[in-house]
């Protein structure tokens, strides 16, 4: 019932046993193949390690035949080694295994081998399939290595105060029947090098939510809402520091350096983190996306100038065509952002300009189309921001803020935005009220937010918030409760 060649490669199987194995679990298939000598004596198997031999490194012995027991037993795609050949990764489910080795029906076997019930086996692996599988496993391996390194370094770096984290949990309710629960975990790592003149920086984002957005707003009432993801890279690169300047090269997003002020950081609406004239008009490296960045800033006498150069689109995946290390200026374009700030004890003011070498198409509902459909047209967005304290006494203060932004093209998703707000602050409490106006391609949206943040202790804070949103989809009221923990 079997047939072998001089090089001990098996060319046929017992048809009845293979038919039984076709409907058996993978480990049963392994046991069937591993326990059968397939025409070889025990001495030959032991001496030559043929058919299912292993070498000292745990792999298959060179020249061992067309099958290897490890990839069948482990079910994880371990390679099959053949003498003089490179390792190739194979599908591990039984259906994929049948497809690869090309089992022929039993009735055809009689014609080809002259013995009924013999099943010829031949390896047929397409090069393109191997490359795709290798690419997927490469990205998975990169992801695993990154997570493993961070996990191994966390205990040591935490004691050295180089490691920190922020956990934010937010419950949302539309005051009717829709609810949602969003969780964001950010892990930060900073390793000083060059005697403190530079540092290796890394940060990952982990997002988990129970459902989709509970209202039909355009700006985004929650600045932590995002798709579920694990270990997305927010920052990964090198920062060098001089006395009055910084230079960063690596993966980064705009939220790390721009639009961060005392009052805007209090509110939970997305437009308080970045203007919709930018965030809604371009698929840039904005939370939760990141991209390769060259950033620098210079400070002198209260003035600060910042500039960042990005790839035209941001990414947050671990796949070959979706990862933050991609640089595709021909397809995505190039995005540059500059900002000039002035800050002193009685105010904080800034002005900025962003330039993108592409104009991204928008459908009737205001959704951005893929970068492949973008036009080769340069558009800009500019903004002004002012934050002014009105009253101070000991640790208590009241301040107001105003901001305005426009996009030079009315064919972009959002081309005008304005906001007014005020906030009270003491040692344990922060309260704020703001009103927003945003002119989108599909209509106008108005938003009012009232929020209160209470610092429970050194690491824990709670923040209830209520927002009213009006656009052509209707009127919405959203109540949210946020818990934040810093460690």
Image: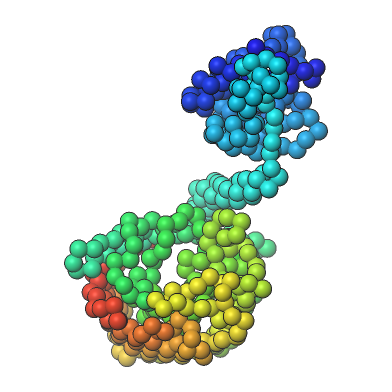
What's the image's color scheme? rainbow
Give the position of the C terminus as an image quadrant.
bottom left
Image quadrant assignment for residue 100: top right
Does any portion of residue 275 appear in the rendered image? no
Eyeballing the image, is 167 above or below 242? above
On the image, the x and y values in percent for residue 114 come to 70, 16
**Does the rendering let one see residue 207?**
yes
Q: Which residue is drawn at 55% across and 87% down?
A: 380
Q: In this view, does 408 lie above or below 157?
A: below
Foreground pick, 346 / 373: 373
In the depicted view, which residue is nearer to us: 482 or 178?
Answer: 178
In the shown orientation, is residue 256 left or right of residue 400?
right
The residue depicted at 39 percent of the width and 60 percent of the height is 184
Q: Where is residue 337 in the image (x, y as percent from the top left)?
A: 57, 81
**At x 52% / y 48%, what residue is drawn?**
151
Rendered residue at 67%/24% (across/down):
120
Q: In this view, does 139 lie above or below 186?
A: above
In the displayed orientation, state which residue is furthest to the left.
176
Q: Position of residue 126 (x, y in %)?
A: 69, 43
State the image quarter where residue 300 is shown. bottom right
Q: Position of residue 9 (x, y in %)?
A: 74, 21
Point out the image quarter for the N terminus: top right
Q: Is residue 95 left or right of residue 111?
A: left
On screen, residue 15 above or below 182: above
| Badge count | 0
């Amino acid at each position: 019932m079997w047939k072998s060649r001089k090089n001990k490669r098996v060319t046929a199987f017992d048809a009845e046993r293979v038919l039984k194995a076709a409907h058996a679990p993978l480990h049963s298939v392994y046991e069937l193949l591993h326990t059968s000598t397939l025409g070889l004596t025990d001495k030959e198997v032991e001496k030559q390690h043929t058919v299912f031999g292993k070498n000292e490194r745990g792999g298959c012995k060179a020249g061992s035949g067309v099958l290897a027991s490890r990839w069948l037993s482990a079910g994880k795609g371990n390679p099959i080694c053949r003498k003089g050949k490179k390792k190739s990764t194979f599908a591990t489910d039984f259906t994929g295994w049948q497809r690869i080795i090309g089992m022929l029906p039993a009735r055809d076997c009689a014609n080809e081998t002259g013995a009924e019930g013999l099943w010829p086996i031949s390896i047929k692996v397409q090069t393109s399939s191997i490359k795709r599988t290798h690419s997927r496993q490469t990205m998975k391996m990169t992801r695993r290595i990154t997570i493993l390194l961070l996990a191994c370094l966390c205990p040591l770096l935490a004691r050295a105060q180089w490691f920190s984290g922020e956990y934010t949990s937010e419950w949302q309710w539309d005051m009717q029947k829709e609810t949602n629960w969003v969780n964001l975990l950010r892990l930060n790592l900073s390793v000083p090098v060059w005697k403190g003149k530079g540092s290796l920086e890394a940060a990952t984002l982990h997002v988990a939510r129970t459902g989709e957005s509970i209202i039909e707003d355009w700006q985004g009432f929650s600045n932590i809402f995002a798709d579920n993801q694990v270990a997305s890279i927010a920052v990964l690169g090198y920062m060098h520091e001089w006395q009055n300047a910084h230079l960063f090269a690596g993966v980064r997003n705009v939220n790390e350096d721009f639009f961060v002020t005392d009052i805007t950081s209090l509110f939970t609406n997305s437009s308080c983190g970045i203007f919709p004239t930018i965030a809604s008009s371009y698929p840039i490296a904005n939370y939760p996306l990141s991209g390769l960045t060259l950033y620098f800033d210079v400070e002198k006498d209260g003035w600060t100038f910042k500039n960042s150069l990005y790839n035209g689109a941001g990414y947050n995946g671990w796949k070959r065509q979706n990862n933050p290390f991609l640089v595709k200026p021909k397809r995505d374009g190039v995005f540059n952002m500059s900002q000039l700030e002035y800050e002193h004890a009685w105010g904080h003011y800034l002005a900025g300009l962003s330039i993108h070498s592409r104009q991204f198409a928008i459908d009737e509902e205001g959704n951005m189309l893929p970068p492949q459909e973008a036009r080769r047209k340069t558009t800009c967005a500019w903004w002004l921001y002012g934050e002014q304290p009105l009253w101070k006494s000991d640790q208590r203060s009241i301040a107001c803020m105003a901001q305005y932004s426009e996009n030079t093209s009315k064919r972009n998703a959002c081309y005008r935005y304005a906001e007014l707000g005020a906030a009270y602050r003491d040692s344990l409490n922060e309260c704020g009220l703001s009103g927003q106006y945003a002119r989108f391609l599909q209509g106008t949206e108005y938003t009012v937010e009232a929020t209160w943040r209470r610092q429970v202790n050194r690491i824990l804070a709670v923040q209830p918030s209520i927002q009213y949103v009006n656009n052509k989809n209707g009127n919405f009221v959203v109540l949210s409760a946020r818990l934040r923990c810093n460690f």
